[in-house]
Image (spheres, coloured by chain):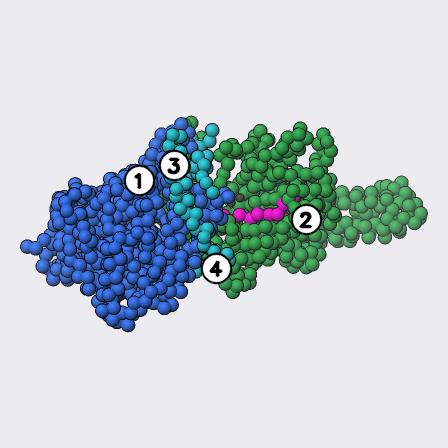
Chain colours: A blue, B cyan, C green
Amino acid sequence: MTDLTKLTLDAALKGLKNKSFSSREITQAHLDAIDAANPQLNAYTLVTADKALAMADTSDAKLAKGEGGALEGAPLGIKDLFSTKDVRTAACSNILGEFAPPYESTVTQNLWDAGAVMLGKLNMDEFAMGSSNETSAYGPVASPWRRAGGDNAKLTPGGSSGGSASAVAADLCLAATASDTGGSIRQPAAFTGTVGIKPTYGRASRYGMVAFASSLDQAGPLAKSVTDAAIMLENMCSADDKDSTCLKLDIPKWTDSVGASVKGMKIGVPKEYRVDGMPAEIDKVWQDGCDWLKAAGAEIVEVSLPRTKYALPAYYIVAPAEASSNLARYDGMRFGDRKDGANLTDVYETTRGEGFGAEVRRRLIIGAYVLSAGYYDAYYLRAQKVRTRILKDLQAVFQDVDALLTPTTPSAAFALGENSADPVSMYLNDVFTVTANLAGIPGISVPAALDAQGLPLGLQVLAPALDEATCFKVASALEDAASFTAKADRWW
Amino acid sequence: MSVTPDDVRKAARLSRIKIDEDRLDHMTGELNGILEWIEQLNEVDVDGVEAMTTPVEMSLPMRADTVTDGDKQSDVLANAPRSDDGFFVVPKSVE
Amino acid sequence: MTERTPYLISGDTGDWEIVMGLEIHAQVASNAKLFSGAATAYGAEPNTQVSLVDAGMPGMLPVINEKCVEQAVRTGLGLNAQINLYSRFDRKNYFYPDLPQGYQISQFAHPIVGEGEIEVDVEPAHGDPAYTFSVGIERLHLEQDAGKSIHDMDPDATYVDLNRSGVALLEIVSKPHIRSPYEAASYVKKLRSIVVALGTCDGDMEKGNLRADVNVSVCRPGGYDKFRETGDFSHLGTRCELKNMNSFRFIQQAIEYEARRQIAIIEDGGEVDQETRLFDPDAGETRSMRSKEDAHDYRYFPDPDLLPLELQQDYVDQIRATLPELPDQKRARFVNDYGLSAYDAGVLVAEADKAEFFEAVAKGRDPKLAANWVSQDLFGYLNKEGLDLGDTPVSATQLGGLIDLISDKTISGKIAKDVFAKLIDEPGADPAAIVERDGLKQVTDAGAIEKVVDDIIAANPEQVAQVKAQAAEGHKKPKALGWFVGQAMKASGGKANPQAVNEILKAKLEI
Ligand SMILES: [Mg+2]
Ligand SMILES: [Zn+2]
């Protein structure tokens, strides 16, 4: 029998439906793969094997009767940011301790309603704050990819959805949920040769998703192909009354857009994305992307997004400001890990001082600072105004073009520990992705090539709000042209 | 604008995050590095520009005034570090 | 109504005036909370009316209750205030164990209601006459209540109940237009009567459903007028905020104490610190709530979990069309339609159930007679016994029946008081039946009265001479005649119709 873990989600769903194998079989295959890989990759923080097999059996019973939802029997991994009922949800922070929510996030509930099977919880940067998965209280995640030439250094899968990316790339699940506040789906996708999409803000409910920065956070999938990403996104999104910022719109059938022609489309290439010091290989893959789309019948035009370089600094005000308030509830009073102290203030300060890791502490303190009396106008308010200008720039450009094509990241994956000394250099990982979060528009990353060291590089497609369909069309054209089939050699 | 150790101490206090005095200078340095980099936002002309607080353009959705929730004391208290007799028990909050 | 005279406190160095602005927190009358589907009813078991949103669990999100928005608009209209079609929710960030989210969702920069104005009636007290003054409303906004901390269940710990957490509050902020402790209490009374009439808050102060924060400052006489002329706050002193008072008596005591405390500080050459203080009713003093080193910086910013609240003018107009009659309108109607004095009308409209009771009694009857019986006899009795109108032993129907007996001369006003006393002792009794049973019917039969009168005249020749002499001197109502009336009433056991007695006496005495 073929290795069931190597299947795409699409292929697995077909196999389940026509009973080539059972959900129990493919679920068990993934559990075995996790057992073998996790000691090295650390992608899962919790494996819910019993639950997975029970869910698989339920699915098999349905499949046997020719019933079942769109994801019936498909084993998935869940980023630890999504609340899963009675299953530890810690956002990979010590402060949550063994928190087991008495509720389910809307996104995961939608997946279970569609018949999916939960394999376990996936590692991530603490509270999704990080770009390398090194801030997790459960330790860093290693990418299945290693540099050619044998230095064997463990590389980052990116962050914050590092566990999701690593698990998908190493075939430890058919697909995974992830979340993207500044690039946390797309950057890991690019680093691991997977596909990741952040939909329009408001497509996926934030109910039950541990909040980092409310106006930027958006759930999306990491998957093995553009088709898989479309299947996942269709089943994650919904119009949810429990989230006031969730769009009250029907979810389009995005799978229909995969493979649709890009002929006659106008694709913009923003000249400001050609940043100083960008590796030639990134430049080359970007040019390749343009050529592929041109060959597929699209027109490539250069456009200008003059405020591009201000997106990241604006983000590093808005996101910490919102986080400083969102994370105030982690105080050890009603849930989570409470530390002792001499008095109430001391209990708060010790609980939070010890419960949060260094990066989270840093961002919470910055967030409090930029909102505090005397600094609000200079920092927070100004950043939100810059955000408006960035949105207007994009809206103007989308008057002329259907989509934008950019590199996903300014570099390939780096080694664990390599980039953690200087916060700002770490923040620069999100330089190409963060604009989509500030503006609330959809963005997808597709693997396009391997660099000279044999590491994946991704291309990003940005489209106007609500036009995920264009993301999928362009991404699938790129996927076809790139015919990226490389997988990491198994070393674990 | 340059951040002083005292600013950091205040912001940490507002955040209820304990930082050791001997880490304060290091933290101040880091914050200054980040804020210096952020200073470039001052180059953007934002005169007369509205602040953007959400990417969503729709009216605030509302719920009906019906009781649909509650009556789940055990769920509410399930993860509490300490509870007693239906109450959360927390450190003494008055002197 | 008379002019308002400044309330002066004399210090060692001269006179001082008090200036106050109030913040009233009124719990919105709604079934469910402001941002969750949990119930708001009072007195439930701890943490049973708590949703996971109210408990601030990770990933839980607010969704606004439409009724609370409507109630805020309704209240704004009742305060003659500007309704802001655009408003927004902000987070007020601070840590406290009964604040689960670590922030309160409130409206800071853009409240749902802007400026308004209400008229406040000050009832006569301490020998001062009644008067009316107006108070500007600065704003009204919607916000969440916090949970309840209980400090006396354990010597070393605090117990927290989140049933109140997330309940909708209206915060109504006045301008600093209030100038005496008694005015402050009168303002709260008036606001309370308005929200109760509107049905937007039950006004139950004992349960804390309406409570007041008072910003108190003192200034020299004339300072306030300069402030009103210029709008410049520097003419007023530094203010202290007295938090969370829920009784009219405490409000007045606290203000009085606080004003004198501030005056003493200034007269000693010191400066008043702007701070939040708490009134301790047992000690009769105010105490500082927070130490200065912990100065608050609430870091307000727009709540990114919510969107701006944008209302249509149509919606506001629809609410306006369904507003009930408000106390001021009702008072005007009582003055016009019933011919009551403004003061009598004011007493009746102060509470909706009182006005309703009065109208039930007055319907088809002499309104002034009804007003007297309701305000003086019934309310006087209830007050003395410490009873609410809801517990009245005499219903509107019974009281109306009693008044009918007076009006059709079945009984005299004096006998009516006795019947009223019996009604109190005999719940549900029919006043006409009591009169019948106890033989209290007024005697109007001329023959019977004549007999009584004849007997008295015959037995008292001296008084007859006296009254005739007084009449001869030209007195239209000779004093001695009163004596005869009294004797005749006494002899009839109070049942004789006094008017008939009078007429028959005059005829018999030929005066
Ligand atoms: Mg206030
Ligand atoms: Zn308030």
For the residues bearing labels 2 and 1, Cβ distance under 8 angstroms: no
Locate residue C62, reporting x and y percent: 40, 51
Q: Is residue C217 left or right of residue B81?
A: right
Q: Is residue C82 left or right of residue C486?
A: left
Determine whether the beta carbon of the residue marked 3 sits less than 8 angstroms from the nearest atom of ligand 1.
no
| Pointer 4 residue | C310
Amino acid at pointer 1 = Ala
Task: Work out whether residue C179 or residue C426 is closer to the camera in this orientation and state it.
Answer: C179
Q: Nearer the viewer, mark 2 or mark 1?
A: 1
Q: Nearer the viewer, mark 1 or mark 3?
A: 1
Q: Nearer the viewer, mark 3 or mark 4?
A: 3
> Label 2 to label 3, Cα distance in Å?
48 Å
Secondary structure at numbered mark 4: strand
> Label 3 to label 4, Cα distance in Å?
42 Å
Residue C230 circle label = 2
From this viewpoint, is residue A352 visible? yes
Say which residue appears at 67% left-offset and 56% top-offset: C332
| Pointer 3 residue | B27
> Label 2 to label 1, Cα distance in Å?
57 Å
Say which residue appears at 35% left-offset and 62% top-offset: A465
Amino acid at pointer 2 = Thr
